Image: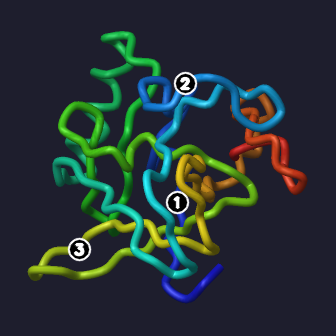
Amino acid sequence: MPAGEHTLGRRETHRGRHGAHGEGGGRGREGREKRGRERRGPCFRQDFVVEYIGEYVRSSLAEQREQKYRKLGYGDDYIFRVDAEQLVDATCKGGVARFANHCCEPNCYTRIITAGGKPRIVLYSKRPIEPGEEITYNYNFDIDEDPTLRIPCRCGSKGCKGFLN
């Protein structure tokens, strides 16, 4: 991981069929449904790609919202941990970065930076990204000991680990 790359816990970002509402459509690697965010213009290594925008909430409210989203039948939630107590909920009030999908060999990585006195989640490119290429990053979920809770990975990369967690 590059210095400063953010590591996520299991409940700290998207679960389920992530990116189900994203742009793109069609089929991606290995026939996987391609519904994530795509790059519109060229991008070079270490370029800023996009900020993960949403509503900043505390852990207790994020847990309540997660339960509410489940009850309402949302297939995904887009909650991303910033620090020990603060999370960004992009489920209802989020930007396009929430549609970036997981990949075991991603073209981007996340970093928490401070801008305007506020911590912000940003995606940077790990390598050049071509226009139209899907934007991906490794969710780095904690490993679940219970195999029934494992989330299958469908990234299709050569180095796919088989599970997100």
Query: Which mark is on residue 119?
Result: 3
Q: Which residue position holds label 1? A: 8
SS at mark 2 in the image: loop
Residue 35, label in figure: none
| Residue found farthest to the right | 158
What kind of element bears circle 1?
A: loop
Q: Tell me if mark 3 has few (under 14), some (14-19) or many (20+) residues whose alpha carbon lies within 10 angstroms of its own.
A: some
Q: Residue 122: x and y, percent?
A: 37, 68
Mark positioned earlier in the residue sequence (3 or 2) = 2
Q: Residue at 24%, 42% (x, y): give it.
A: 94
Q: Quadrant of the N terminus?
A: bottom right
Left or right: where does residue 66 sit relative to residue 129? Answer: left
Q: Amino acid at mark 2?
A: Gly
The residue at 75%/33% (across/down) is 152
Q: How is the image coloured?
A: rainbow
154 with respect to 118 (left or right): right
How far apart are the alpha carbons under marks 1 and 3?
Answer: 16 Å
Secondary structure, mark 3, is strand
The image position of residue 53, as x and y in percent, is: 24, 53
Circle 1 residues within 10 Å: few <14, some 14–19, many ≥20: some
Which residue is found at the position 47% from the left and 43% from the top? 37
Q: Which residue is mark 2?
A: 25
* Residue 120 shown left or right of residue 12 in the figure: left
Label 2 Cα neighbours within 10 Å, binned few <14 / some 14-19 / many ≥20: few
Residue type of the residue flagged with mark 3 = Pro
Q: Nearer the viewer, mark 1 or mark 3?
A: 3
Mark nearest the camera among 2 and 1 is: 2
Instruction: Tell me which amino acid carries mark 1.
Output: Leu
In this view, the mark in front (3 or 2): 2
